Image (spheres, helix red, strand yellow):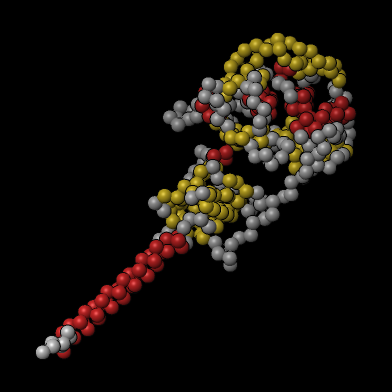
Amino acid sequence: MIVPCCTPQTARPRSAMLRRVASVMLLFVATAFTGFATAQSPAAKTIEDTWQGTLHAPQKDLRLVLKIADANGSPKATLYSIDQGGGSMAASTTTFQDNTLTVAVAMLELKYEGKLSADGKSISGTFKQGDGPSTPMVLERATPETAWAIPEPPKRLPPMPADAKPVFEVATIKPSNPDQKGMGFTFRNGNFMTINTTLLAIIKFSYGLQDKQVVGLPDWATTEKWDFNGKADIEGMPNPEQTRHMMQVMLGERYGLKFHEDTKEMSAYVLSVAKTGPKMELAPKDAGPLPGLFFRGLGVLTVSNATMPDFCQLMQSAVLDKPVVDQTGLTAKYNFLLKWTPDESQFGGMGMKVPPPSDAADAPPPLYTAITEQIGLKLESGKAPVKVLVIDHVEKPSAN
């Protein structure tokens, strides 16, 4: 007698087993898809995207756009202040950890820190610049429908031919507004301008000198202030040497400046490289021919695309009381931020009175310490042969 392998009594349990297997398979498939969906959900909350928000600054509201991209597995942010033009600011620091975003632009002492919302659509945090107050700011994830337009940045002028000898085709000189604060030299929209500058300041800029290197000026040349605006006779962006050449020609034509040169051994500051080596960032090669050196307050200096002679010239003309001699041997152009607590001997070249130093624990160090610690250079007193301009003749500017 042959016994069947499957009797009616055993078939039902097998069917039930198959149903259980099928249920397990369906459960596995459902779990797999659930796991896939769960794995994908954070992708909708990644930080790499375009974010935008309004900063309620003390003077006025500013719309900011923050573009965050992936850079070899790490976030990299670029900031746009679209109500102040279309220029971009690359962040020096971008981190995103535990749903907290931190973005900093060290050169401008800007910092934003905020927490990503649970739905990934906004970041709530604070914006701070320098020693200013922290300001609440919410960034929203932009969509094609809500994204703010970023203005086109102004087109950069091509450089003038390197062998060009430009002069000012048109130049106006007028007395400064007596209520004008500060002073400055700038190149904008094809025009070179000075604001609130004495003749001494213009001569120092034009010839790369310090106060003690200009001898024989009349009193009015150190007290009366002027605004200058000139347009070059050659199209393009001049380099620093071409800019100084134009100003030297203008001084002869409009102020009747005549002088002779001498060399004297005198007290000076010597700038050299510290033992640590330079700590400055190399400027991008496409940054243009002109440097940018700006004070955002007494003892807060932002430098971009500048050589060591550019830095020395600014320090000797605006901050220090003696010439500054460059002995660094560095020939590149650099970006850096220098922050220090000035003393009463500094900023005479800008006609500024320095307040008493702060005794706060977090106050920046003195200038000499800051130069070594922050940018890897060394500034020391010494003696050096320096050029001196002896003024033979000068007069108030001729009519426009």
Q: Quadrant of the C terminus?
A: top right
Above/below status of 57 relative to 14: above
Q: Nearer the viewer, residue 330 or 2?
A: 2
- Residue at coordinates 64% horizontally, 37% vertically from top-left? 283
What is the tally of numbered marks visible in this picture? 0
Q: Quadrant of residue 309?
A: top right
Q: Is residue 174 visible?
A: no
- Residue at coordinates 84% horizontally, 38% vertically from top-left? 232
Would you say 203 lies left or right of 43 here? right
**Residue 60: x, y in percent?**
59, 51
Q: Quadrant of residue 326?
A: top right
**Residue 257: x, y in percent?**
85, 23
**Residue 266: x, y in percent?**
68, 11
Q: Quadrant of the N terminus?
A: bottom left
Would you say 395 lies left or right of 56 here? right
Q: Nearer the viewer, residue 345 or 8?
A: 8
- Residue at coordinates 64% horizontally, 60% vertically from top-left? 149
Residue projecting furthest to the left: 1
Residue projecting furthest to the front: 1
Would you say 218 lies left or right of 356 here? right
Residue projecting furthest to the top: 265
- Residue at coordinates 63% horizontally, 22% vertically from top-left? 328
**Residue 368: x, y in percent?**
55, 22
Would you say 216 lies left or right of 20 here? right
Above/below status of 84 relative to 141: above
Q: Nearer the viewer, residue 355 or 265?
A: 265
Q: Is residue 47 visible?
A: yes
